[in-house]
Amino acid sequence: MAVLDDLSGFEFEDVMEDVFRNLGYENVRQADRTADEGRDVIMEEVVDGTRRAIIVECKHTGTVGRPVVQKLHSAIATFDFDGPKRGMVVTTGRFTNPAQEYANRLQQNDDPHPIELLDGEDLREIADEIGLDLYNGRIEILCDETLRPYDPAADVDVPVTEAFRDIENIEAADLPEPHSAVTFRPVAAVTADTNAVFETSVGVIHRINDRTRFVAHAERGQPQVANEDVATLVTENLHATVDLDAEQFGEVFDAVEERRFGQTQTDYKEWAVERLQQHHTTTVTYTGDNNVTYNKTCEPNRSDISVQSIEPVYLPEVRHTTDLQEYTYPYEYYAAGPSRVTAEDGIHRCVHCDTSGGDETYTYCPNCGAIACSSHIKTERLEGEPICTGCAVTERFALKTKYFYDEENLEAFREEYAEMPLHEKAMENKWLAGGSVVATILLVVGLLVIGGII
């Protein structure tokens, strides 16, 4: 089978657009296929600080002769660009000797519009560099870089320590070392331009000129767009990636897992174009020449959408779990060095109800290890320390429920309570003791009755 033999000419142009983008060229886009004037792909490069346009002719054929190269040279001269220009002819086959001689002569004569030739053998070398499958034209994801999974200037457990700092009645020194695990999840940062004009007999009724950047989770299955916080974390830290060295990170975390990219880069491009088509499709109402109101659905064509870049990278998802007596508290976040986005916060969450979030007050129960909201935290009668309603032993004294760490504390208070004078027993219910005299008298009488005195 010849190189990319199963592709049509248009499909070959699509592949070459992706190839050049992966080789680092900028503003890669296809010319209008209905009137390309010999220009199939247009792109730019910066050499020694000068931006230069490159006009590419794609020929999905066995042999390319001199006339193709000559035609491209004329097209370069007429191409409207404020700066230097050069050309390139790419074929899956080979170039004839006259074609190569013509291109060489342009180079030797320092022609202002030189032309570079890439044949099937050159494509094979490029394929190895960028992960191009020469038989189906799809470009694989080649990625060995990750955002940094922890802040190198701090201990890996610092985020957990900071989270527990908000919990009352617990000290950082009392916390056990959490179990830490990192999963390197594949994501792709996509940048695309959409440029479309919709006209009717009355003129332009709608125009799209938009650059879109989003981040997609890129594991198996349909790609999913990341939320705004995660997307910002990724895009703002793409300049600071590090090599994904599982062995090195295994020395920092208790467990390390690396997920695979679920699809090819070509798949993500096609998905992004389809998504942007749907996103930009809208219905426009306009008035025709006959003063009749019309509705027209404006949907950009695939050729109106140019994917400028697909930047794959691994996004570390760090999960800490801290065991405190009867409870385990997870804390999970996406990391990029010192920056992070919380994915799960099991620390700021009451173990007894649905209360969660950083606006609530949470207290640690040293009796069972629970973290509870104010509705589920009481004061232990003997120790004067917090205790949660889930583990407390309770009993009513002086018409009020008292909370104890265990039966031993309860029994100790029973004995203490039995020895109390009546006025001290009344004080066990501060609301009654601080209320009316009648209420206090009634309480005392009630206690006497219960005690069998009257």
Image: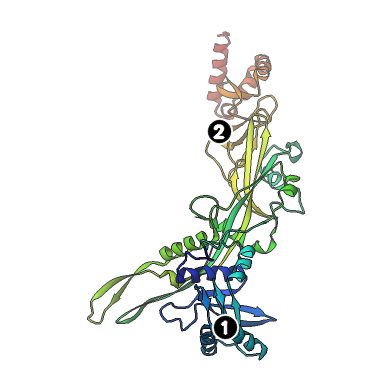
Q: Quadrant of the C terminus?
A: top right
Q: Is tag 2's residue or tag 1's residue first in the polypeptide sequence?
A: 1
Q: Amino acid at mark 2?
A: His
Q: CA separation, marks 2 and 1?
A: 79 Å
**Residue designated by label 1:** 99
Count the numbered circles shown: 2
The spot of residue 354 in percent (x, y) is: 52, 38
Vertical side of 151 occupied by 295: above or below: below
The spot of residue 27 in percent (x, y) is: 56, 75
Residue 337 sits in quarter: bottom right
**Residue designated by label 2:** 352
Residue, x 63% and y 63% (percent of image)?
128
Which type of secondary structure does the marked residue at label 2 adopt? loop
Vertical side of 1 occupied by 406: above or below: above
Taking the view exactly as shown, the residue that stands out farthest to the front is 97
> According to the image, what is the colour scheme of the structure?
rainbow
Residue nearer the viewer, 111 or 186: 111
Vertical side of 103 occupied by 92: above or below: above
The spot of residue 16 in percent (x, y) is: 54, 70
The spot of residue 37 in percent (x, y) is: 46, 84
Kindly check if marks 2 and 1 are in contact, taking CB atoms under 8 A apart as contact.
no
Residue 299 sits in quarter: bottom left
| Neighbours of disc 1 within 10 Å: few (<14), some (14-19), many (20+) | some
Q: Amino acid at mark 1?
A: Ala
Which type of secondary structure does the marked residue at label 1 adopt? helix
Q: Is residue 146 visible?
A: no
| Horizontal relation, residue 48 to residue 442: left or right | right
Residue nearer the viewer, 364 or 435: 364
Q: Is residue 357 visible?
A: yes
